[in-house]
Every structure is written in C-alpha cells, then in structure tokens.
Image (cartoon, rainbow, N blue to C red):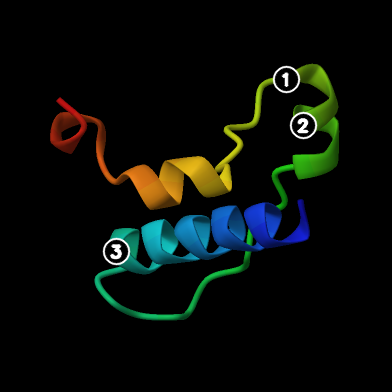
Amino acid sequence: MALNKTFISIQLIMEDIMKHDGGNAFRLRHMHKDRLLRAGELAVMRREHLLEGPPESRA
C-alpha cells in the first residue's frame, strides 16, 4: 500500500507542476490518503493492473 500512496503523491505533484507552468513555487497539498483509502474512495493500483497493461490493449 505504501507504493500505491507514493505513486498517487507523485501524480498530484506532477499535476501541480503542470498547473504552475512547470515551476515548483507551490505548497504540496494534503489529500488524506489513509482516510480516502478506508472509505474506498482512493484508486488502488494492483500489480495485476501493471502487468496487464492499459484496458484497450487487453482485448
């Protein structure tokens, strides 16, 4: 689960970088990943998803 939360953090940081035109003059936001995970509202990346590839390539 730690790797999943780390990956989500990196995704959010990349999103913020794009919002700030490639800069890094912003504060990191806290999205309460543990609470969202318990509520079932946080996307979970499983190893099978990584091995299968994108959905369109599975057909």
Residue on which disc 3 sits? 18
Secondary structure at badge 1 equals loop
Question: Label 2 vs label 3: CA separation?
Answer: 25 Å
Task: Name above or below for residue 42 compared with residue 33.
Answer: above
The label nearer to you, 1 versus 3, is 1
Residue 54 in picture, x, y percent from top left: 25, 40
Q: How many marks?
A: 3
Q: Which mark is residue 37?
A: 2
Residue on which disc 1 sits? 40
Nearer to us in this view, 55 or 33: 55
Task: Name above or below for residue 34 compared with residue 29.
Answer: above
Q: Quadrant of the C terminus?
A: top left
Q: Which mark is residue 3?
A: none
4 on left or right of 50:
right
Which residue is painted at 57% across and 32% down in the image?
43
Question: Label 1 vs label 2: CA separation?
Answer: 5 Å
Mark 1 and mark 2 in contact? Answer it, CB < 8 Å: yes
Residue 25 in picture, x, y percent from top left: 48, 79
Marked residue nearer the N-terminal end (1 or 3):
3
